[in-house]
Image (cartoon, helix red, strand yellow):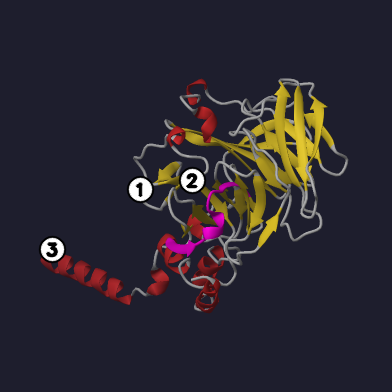
Amino acid sequence: MVDDKKTTTKNKKVKLEAQTWSDLPIELLELILCRLSLEDNIRSSVACKRWNTAAISVRVVNQSPWLMYFPKFGNMYEFYDPAQRKTYSLELPELYGSRVCYTRDGWLLLYRPRTNRVFFFDPFSQEVVKLPRFELTYQIVAFSCAPTSNTCVVFTVRHVSPTIVAISTCHPGATEWVTVNYQNRLPFVSSIWNKIVFCNGFFYCLSLTGWLGVFDPLERTWSVLAVPPPKCPENFFAKNWWKGKFMSEHNGDILVIYTCCSENPIIFKLDQPKMVWREMKTLDGMTLFASFLSSHSRTDLPGMMRNSVYFSKVRFFGKRCISYSLNDCRYYPCKQCYDWGEQDPFENIWIEPPEDLSAFI
């Protein structure tokens, strides 16, 4: 018996010593490979078939958005990269006295309440594109593409009454905003908690109560779709529940995220042919980056970031965002309070990072 035990122990020891890097669990291998640069990832993929599969599965083609923080005092702005878990700082005195409204294609749309000044700003090139003055009260604003494009349109909607909305549009180079009143067949109330995305040539606006308005900037038409709001569990609607709603688009699809401090997030996709909201149990490898004013979607990010939602909410006083994994059905980090009502909607926003980091670091 003693000899048998010694033999077994010896065999185990030999097997352990014979193990190589190729014997690592696939999850651990992906975790290591996802931290490599694209060039090193490609080099690693030629080691063996197993490494090739793992390297391709975590190969980064797209960059993750960065979370930009707007300070309460001073001109020092911080940018958090969730993929590398690094924070960068940049001094931007040009933004003093401004509040952020929207972001797309690496550009910020900002508003100065004291002067009613509306302008675009690229924080990395520090380029400015001015718009005519306009008073923004309790409505949100969005734009279709970078202001350097001749197809850029700025859009905002404000309700005059439950059945009438005033839609204002503008574009770079214009001398004034154009405002037109539209009548709704369904009630639509404007609020700072509404959401706007530009998708397939249309502006989609989700109201406080979950109704979806659509504006065609070419035909200048507006309608509120007869699509019942997404259905959620009764216990989902807690205090400040409307502040935990987000909307994004991906490859022509409209996505809505509902959150609650005591429940897991629920993600809906608009079934446009049938005009109904359908709950999504998986993102099929996609990653969503949700913030109050604008949200983004990405594919081909590191494996550990896929099939997840990254929220703009900070962790305690640090500059780390919170994520929810649909694979694991849990938040990271866990055991935290996710009370969206306590967060300032103008505190941070996701923005596309620069291609060349050396330009401002």
Residue 330: x %, y % from top left: 43, 42
Q: Amino acid at mark 3?
A: Met
Q: Nearer the viewer, residue 290 or 268?
A: 290
Tell me, yes or no, whether the two marked residues, 3 and 2, touch with CB atoms within 8 Å.
no
Picture layout, residue 47 above or below residue 9: below
Q: Amino acid at mark 1?
A: Phe
Please indicate, yes or no, whether residue 136 appears anywhere in the rendered image: yes
Q: Label 3 vs label 2: CA separation?
A: 69 Å
Direction from residue 75 to residue 118 in the image, left or right: right
Q: Nearer the viewer, residue 337 or 191?
A: 191
Looking at the rendered structure, the secondary structure element under dot 2 is loop
Disc 2 designates what residue?
A: 347
Q: Earlier in the sequence, mark 3 or mark 2?
A: 3
Which label sits on residue 60?
A: none
At x 60% / y 69%, what residue is drawn? 355
Q: Label 3 vs label 1: CA separation?
A: 60 Å
Residue 230: x %, y % from top left: 63, 28
Disc 1 designates what residue?
A: 317
Q: Looking at this view, name the residue that lies furthest to the right.
A: 219
Residue 342: x %, y % from top left: 43, 35
At x 50% / y 24%, what residue is drawn? 237
At x 65% / y 33%, what residue is drawn? 278
Tell me, yes or no, whether the two marked residues, 2 and 1, touch with CB atoms within 8 Å.
no
> What is the crowding at mark 1: few (fewer than 14 residues within 10 Å), some, or many (at least 20)?
few
Residue 97 within the segment the image draws in magenta: yes
Please indicate, yes or no, whether residue 81 appears anywhere in the rendered image: no
Q: Amino acid at mark 2?
A: Glu
Stretch of the chain drawn in magenta: 85-102
